[in-house]
Amino acid sequence: MVDDEKNSREALEFMLQHSGKAIKLVARCKSADEAVEQIQLHHPDLVCLDIEMPGKDGFEVLNAFEHPDFKVIIITGYEHYALKAIKHAALDFVLKPIELEELVCALNRVERALELEDPRLPYLAERLAQEHTPPDKIILSTHRGFKTVAVEDILFLEASQGNYSTIYLSNDRTELVTKPLNHFEELLCARQFFRVHRSFLVNLSSIRRYQRCKGELAVGQDKIIAVAARRRGDFYKAYQAFLQ
């Protein structure tokens, strides 16, 4: 479920628990950014999505997924969102304050839709293959909205103030994203990336030169990055393994 208001989340959870449906609630999100992250993590069958939220709205959550493999019930206090919800292929539309009977009807339609055509089937083989395979693309949350970038286009990432990260891309592009460097380290280190310094995460394929005596990397066209002294041994082993 996605709703920026704590009382609304609690009310919806109570109704879901008393809907008579076998529902497992895997995440309670209070922002669009958190929702995108949790959907990527849990791959839910259904997302109950509020629209009006500070910053990015609920439709930006849907726009972040090129091929969404989940059903959507829009839950909002604003009826004028109905047409836009339909255009975004929302399965149903429930107005606040939520009535249990109306919510159950929406859940019934979700059940029927999942029985008739499981939207995850086209992606099942791909997901099984990716179970042990790092992603080729990642979704970035920026101040302009969500953006998908190819992992191979990332040269390196730098920690920025306030739990932000700056991503340096090919063609001299940069993106300031609302995630700390630790988040990307967990996401990318299985894919030829190495944390050479507490402030830098480097794509090994973007390294042009490594001066071992100085512990310095030449990355991209003109960036020099120092490898932390305590990480040089592990980095050298990882880099040698990558080059083989």
Image: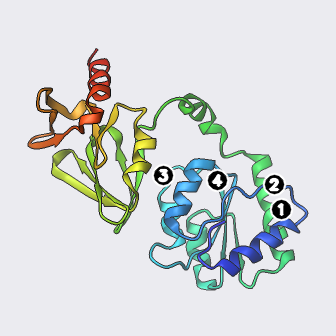
Q: Which mark is residue 208?
A: none
Which color scheme does this rendered protein use?
A: rainbow
Task: Judge from the rendering whether residue 217 lies leftward or rightward of residue 127; answer left or right.
Answer: left
- Which mark sits nearer the N-terminus, 3 or 2? 3
Q: Which residue is mark 4?
A: 70
Q: Secondary structure at mark 3?
A: loop
The amino acid on which the numbered mark 4 sits, given as a three-letter code, is Phe
Of 62 and 24, nearer the camera is 24
Q: Residues within 10 Å of mark 4 (few under 14, many from 20)?
A: some
Q: Residue shown at 63%/49% (left/top)?
A: 42
Of 113 and 232, nearer the camera is 232
| Residue 193 on image: x %, y % | 34, 35
The amino acid on which the numbered mark 1 sits, given as a three-letter code, is Asn
Q: Secondary structure at mark 1?
A: helix
- Which mark sits nearer the N-terminus, 4 or 2? 4
Rounded to the nearest whole Å, what is the CA distance between mark 4 and mark 1? 15 Å
Rounded to the nearest whole Å, what is the CA distance between mark 4 and mark 2? 14 Å
